[in-house]
Image: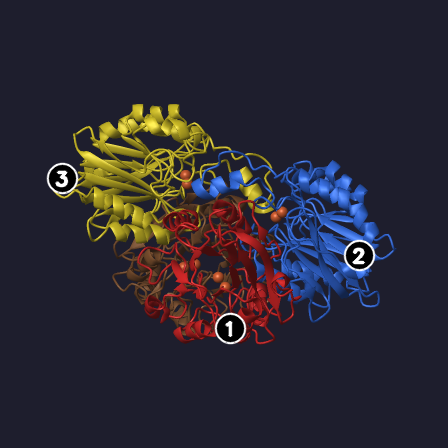
Chain colours: A blue, B red, C brown, D yellow
């Protein structure tokens, strides 16, 4: 099975690049399933229902979130009816929406998509390790799902790597998001789970995390806000990770990062096009 | 001019891989200057004088540090006499050692090596932006140094990217360290400074930040220490960044990440070997 | 019912002062129940079994803990058999010991003692609000316990005050610990729960948090350790909070801070001695 | 000389109570100098020029600030002309306004007022210890100022206590602000400097830090904003610290906390009224 995960969409530049790329990528790689993190899709802060629907219409099977999940107030309401929009699993009980969903792929396979959030240098929430463990126990690879994709939205590389090892052999893929910077440590862990510390963002990398450089730099220098943060509008890179799973086990057999457009060096899963 | 920077050496596995690789890399790429971050070289915590000397003897022109700079108590004393060992510039006045040094390369060029530390999610210290600005004013590219290399030891990608833009055009290279995870955002910024958010570590990536997985994972799960952290001893990857500068300007003209050995996908600056 | 709570014992000075004071205070105020926080009783770091027993023998009905609960490795073992030693409730499942205990007072009343830990600026653990809510539901005031005492070990005054309001009317007392500095906001909240943001410590206040001033000050100035932290050994203040509850409701009717000895201004619950 | 310091004014309730109390307190205690922290005076966030002027008109000799100093944008402009409004000294160079000012008291004495901000669990700024040290060297007690008052706006009690010891004997008073909760550790340190970890706030204590309880509690429980923070409007307590200095040395000879009105137990410097 062929999965593609794309990292945090930042603002209009990232959104347009992603929406334009998704149908082409689905076709070029004959993808079975595509997930994209949308926590910064609306001007850098959260996601509106119409943007979520645009992403689904473009061909995303699911959209994951993170600490910015509810920056757009309307998300608190519409998330209930959007079954492909997944917010962090380990938010407090009672949070609107779902933290995991079993989603039917175009090829008929059932994919469990989990979004969880780290706690190191982030909001104080409940344990992501135990929360994920509960989901994987309730819906195990092969018995419950044909593939399992975990978007772990976290800051610290230590927490991400520890989680990768924690679920190794029980998920098809653990991919980090939130730092908006792609790492080059993608690989298959010893137990068969594909891993990458961060998928990077879909946005303009000539920036600070996808936001126009001036204001973030001003704040580091002066410690005072001068203006609002605005997404950078230069050419965006679509950034993420391609994973091929073994249908018999649901585990990963091939993994390769994807970067397309913008100022970063391009790369793609050549094993799917050769 | 050909520069190579290698990220945080973690423990014995990383040290051996680095010491074995350095002479070969110098020769293979005809390097003019090589810097390596050694803050975790001694069992994961700091660096002894003999390890520092081993690295210099192997062919490093300078060794940079970070938050673990003085984990080995002897460093407080011997750093005064080790002119190629650079600790964070923005540590408090009175800290032993130096935060920047002009080092003569084998080709006769003078390279300013700066080590600075971020403040986001790290120790409370003075402003790295202003500290670096002072150094770059005192010893500017071309008038004061043929090349300028900045190792910015920081956690947050926002702070790293902001610093890259802040010095763009005034340094040959800004490279991040500390997360022990290589990023794939290496490129030349609009003003001519080579940039990479994190060089990654020289160590065993089948681990948590180069440390044996069991104890870090135990701490995330139980929040209690059970044992000491021990460096992982599997095959190490040597990870870093190759930069070629224009002799006329000191700015970057080519940049490429390097990864060699271990479990990560290998890459190298092919433009130097073709 | 007459309850006395005493804050974090720091090292030998605090321990001796507390052990000497406890029997006298029990007698002077005709106390029904006395709880003391012992997380720093052993040289500033944790508590040994023999110190715990000394405190119980001196007349404490229960000993509470905090982030330093398991600094002494032996505590992981002996806490199972010490039914009056309470560690934070919201530590991960599987943590040795208990986070709440119903303890029989000398007057035959049953007192529920809860220790919980805040999350703001502290270790990443599970939600103290929900954990406490579950305990109060399982063992409610009057139906399950004659009095309920909550030691909320937390850094941020915001989290402490929010918790006070959260349980107001459902506990006899919420008292903060951890800052080692007594606050003067003790009072009865509108719903009948006694509240004080921090009980202060039992230790030498001519210090930094009960530790000898020199090394903490050195670290603030140089950001480098020079020596170990050592408890200050000057005259200690015994610091805490006296609460009288209404036997019919279990809620507070009188509250007054207690400070005895050392360099702080003394105060005591005069309503019990006049 | 008789000094009174009052802690952070929070919103309208705190402001009205302070403005009403200041003239009465000046008269009742024959005060020579009065300083009040105004960082939350404007609806909880910063201070407008007209509020600042109201406080001065009511009888404050100086107004200090903190992390909320510039929450009202106009402060960036008007602070230049308001010589009695003091913002944290260790903000970056170039920050509008001043971090220390020598202010002439009604009795003709010159009082150096310093506002500095801690770094533990707060914004990343430069070292408050060294910044204060420089001011005390430039304008020493007796040779440069008849009294020296330091408002140390900080979260951690460790940092506050370390600073108290650091300047002991060189300032008349070090008083903490920012936690909005009065401590009861006011005393004269061995070298003669009056010290109190936190002055508390001028505001409604039936609240969370002076803000209406509902929304802060909601955020602790759900981790999501529902509404804006609004100052609590119940009866406010005026909270602070009274210090008498020796005219010959500028050091403290008497110290006593002050609390007036609202839900906290009242206290006052009886040595000035008996
Ligand atoms: Fe994001
Ligand atoms: Fe995020
Ligand atoms: Fe490191
Ligand atoms: Fe580091
Ligand atoms: Fe403590
Ligand atoms: Fe503590
Ligand atoms: Fe405040
Ligand atoms: Fe503040």
Tally of numbered discs: 3
Q: Quadrant of residue A167?
A: bottom right
Residue D76 spot, x, y in % from top left: 41, 30
**Residue placed under numbered mark 1 in the picture:** B11
Q: Is mark 2 within 8 Å of ligand 1?
A: no
**Residue placed under numbered mark 3 in the picture:** D247
Name the disc covering residue A273, or none.
none
Q: Is residue D111 left or right of residue A118?
A: left
Q: Residues within 10 Å of mark 3 (few under 14, many from 20)?
A: some
- Element type at mark 3: loop
Q: Residues within 10 Å of mark 2 (few under 14, many from 20)?
A: many
Measured along the vertical axis of the image, is residue B25 above or below residue C176? Answer: below
The front one of A67 and C175 is: A67
Q: Residue at x 19, y 34 (%)?
A: D110
- Whole-Å distance between the Cαs marked 1 and 2? 40 Å
Residue C115 spot, x, y in % from top left: 49, 58
Q: Residues within 10 Å of mark 1 (few under 14, many from 20)?
A: many
Proximity of marks 1 and 2: CB atoms separated by less than 8 Å: no
- Element type at mark 1: helix
- Element type at mark 2: strand
Q: Chain of mark 2?
A: A
**Residue placed under numbered mark 2 in the picture:** A111
Q: Chain of mark 1?
A: B
């Amino acid at each position: 099975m062929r999965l593609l995960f794309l990292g945090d969409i930042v603002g209009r530049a990232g959104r347009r690049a992603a929406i334009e790329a998704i149908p082409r990528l689905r076709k070029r790689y004959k993808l079975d399933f595509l997930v994209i993190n949308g926590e910064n899709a609306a001007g850098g802060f959260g996601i509106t229902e119409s943007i979520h629907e645009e992403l689904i219409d473009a061909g995303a099977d699911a959209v994951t979130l993170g600490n910015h999940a509810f920056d757009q107030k309307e998300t608190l309401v519409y998330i209930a009816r959007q079954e492909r929009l997944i917010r962090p699993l380990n938010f407090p009980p009672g949070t609107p929406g779902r933290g995991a969903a079993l989603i039917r792929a175009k090829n008929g396979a059932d994919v469990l998509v989990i979004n969880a959030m780290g706690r190191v240098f982030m909001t104080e929430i409940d344990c992501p390790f135990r929360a994920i463990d509960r989901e994987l126990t309730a819906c195990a690879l092969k018995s419950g799902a044909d593939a399992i994709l975990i978007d772990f939205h976290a800051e610290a590389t230590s927490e991400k790597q520890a989680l990768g090892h924690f679920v190794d052999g029980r998920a098809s893929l653990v991919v980090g998001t939130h730092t908006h910077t792609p790492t080059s440590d993608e690989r298959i862990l010893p137990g068969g789970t594909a891993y990458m510390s961060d998928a990077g963002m879909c946005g303009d990398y000539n920036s600070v995390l996808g936001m126009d450089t001036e204001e973030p730099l001003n704040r580091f220098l002066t410690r005072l806000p001068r203006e609002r943060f605005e997404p950078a509008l230069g050419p965006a890179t679509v950034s993420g990770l391609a994973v091929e799973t073994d249908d018999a086990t649901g585990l990963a057999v091939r993994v390769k990062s994807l970067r397309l457009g913008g100022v970063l060096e391009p790369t793609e899963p050549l094993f799917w096009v050769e």
